[in-house]
Amino acid sequence: MEFANLPHDFAETLELVFVGITIIVSLAIMVAFGAWWQR
Amino acid sequence: MAVEAPAKPTLADKIYDKMFHNYVWKSIFRTGYPNTPRNQMLVVATNVFLHLHPTRIHRTHVKITHTYCLGGLSFFMFLGLTVTGILLMFYYVPSVERAYLDMQNITTTVQFGQLMRNMHRWMAHAMVILVFMHMMRVFYTGAYKPPREFNWVVGVILLVLTFLLSFTGYLLPWDQLAFWAITVGTNIAGSAPVLGPKTRFWLLGGFEVGADSLIRFYTLHVIGLPLLAAIFMAVHFWRIRRDGGLARPL
Amino acid sequence: MATAVVARPVARPQARARDEEVLVWPDLVFVEFIAALLFTITLFILSVVINAPLLDQANADVTPNPSKAPWYLLNLQELLLHMNAAMAGIIVPTVWLIILGAFPYFDRDTDGQGAWFGTEGAVRLTVVSGIVGFVGTWALILWDSGKVAFFLNDWFGLSGGDTMRFLENVRSMQSQLPWPEWASKITYLPFNLKLLDGTGSGGPTTFQHLDFPGWLVEQGIPTALLVGLPSLMIYTLWRMGWVVNRRDALLALFSGFVASYGVLTLCGTAFRGQGQELVFPWELKVSEGIPGQEAGH
């Protein structure tokens, strides 16, 4: 897989957006896992 | 009453016995495999890392939708940042002549350098966000109420330390983004009434962001602030145990 | 029991309810492990796919436009555009951190603790304060950027002419109103008071003359709004019967704070372009600041 560089003009904004999305997705997967494992 | 005779030990049983019941293994792991309640409690109580936890915990506190593991994840981010940070420290020298070249070196020549640098930066952003979300969770579950008042204050201090850690680290790549962001940040600090200019001078080690600022920020970032954060985290975790664990309904 | 807590001067930890407890190993430790593993994997994937930025080497002579602080300080940088620098950068965050730290000493009632939104009406209070904070902060930002006047003129053809210009943004109250000469230099001390010989930019803090219109625009109005608007919101909610005790007041305050913090950060990162002009996110452009080169690329 290739590393991708963030577009120059939006670098700082997108940094935050991507980390935010990653966190939300991870938490969502955690909650789903919890719902399944901790029935 | 007929009692079943025990089955003859199979080869697997004998190998298991040799591996996990020998003197050396048992000198390290003294409690036995945690598949009985007694062993499960012992393994938590007698392990230096795990005895952060009590042996038993209220059942609402293991639900992911209660805490979302946010506090634990913040600490985990801190650990991950320490590991990736140390790896980056092998290749980085905080001098104006070398810093940027080292960054280019890390992101091109060093094996997995780009990956380590990326992980360090994303985990840094993640830690700030997770700490903030943890504060929100504690607030909305009312877990700052007595007897946990002081732990909330320690948490606020940790929030500030997290911001400072991120801020000091931001300068280290010594590129335009870093240099000017820190210039803006320290100018804000310098605008404080009365003590502003002096504080800015102390932070930067001079009147402008330069070589002295870099070494100062580096020292704060790799040892000064992490030590402080570790001390306050120790207080924070200890207080949780002392206050009777996580907050639960009366 | 709750009465025992009230009777003693210091709150004691609750008694354990052993029959309600589960073993930490494996129930908690496994969950923590999964959480750590999951975040490691997702952050690893993110690190493989997207690079952390590395621009040109630091150069004190070349200033990129706009120059932005790291994202968690962008809310303060946004405030900086609307009020006096010392207030935006130091006083407001310090005062807020102190208030934040004082939360548990203000709300000592253990009612509803341990559960999400444990008290009555907590959810709607949170949502409403959040919305008020969100909308209110955006409205103030838009007003102070002159956009409200601009839209009123552009969309509805409304214009107050020259007499109403002082309402365009907060700064106009200083520049567009006919202040008398003496108002910019009101002497309140007979001598020049210097506190701590200043080193570096800005010079020493001196106290002798008051520039009243400047003070009004940079400190008076911002302070009034920062203190007055949340108080107004909580007071209104109290009169409506939605805020009943201290916990409710804190809920409203905190939710409003989170919403405005989010808006300020969002605005600072996605809506401030060159010269800190308010633009749409897709119009963001960063100029390297290299003399002789065109802005942006």
Image (spheres, coloured by chain):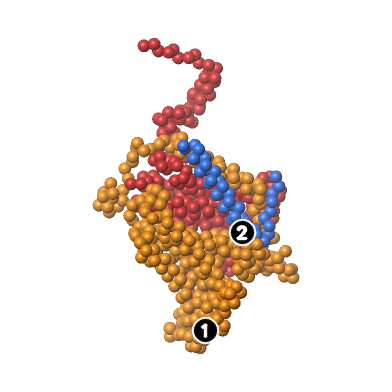
Chain colours: A blue, B red, C orange
- Near-viewer residue (C71 or B157): C71
Q: Position of residue B187 (x, y in %)?
A: 56, 68
- When the figure is inspected, residue B68 is found, relative to residue A7, above or below; the finding is above
Quarter where residue C45 is shown: top right
Amino acid beneath label 2: Thr
Considering only vertical position in the picture, is A14 above or below C35?
below
Where disc 2 sits, the SS reads helix
Same-subunit check for callouts 1 and 2: no
Q: What is the number of callouts on the image?
A: 2
Say which mark, if any, is on residue C177: 1
Side of C226 relative to C119 (left or right): right
Give percent across and percent down for residue B129.
Answer: 53, 53
Task: Name the side, left or right, on which C8 lies relative to C141.
Answer: left
Q: Distance between the residues labelled 1 and 2?
A: 38 Å
Q: Name the residue under label 2.
A: A13
Q: Is C64 positioned to the left or the right of B138 in the image? A: right
Confirm whether residue C127 shows in the render.
Answer: yes
Residue shown at the point (49%, 70%) measured from the top left: C87
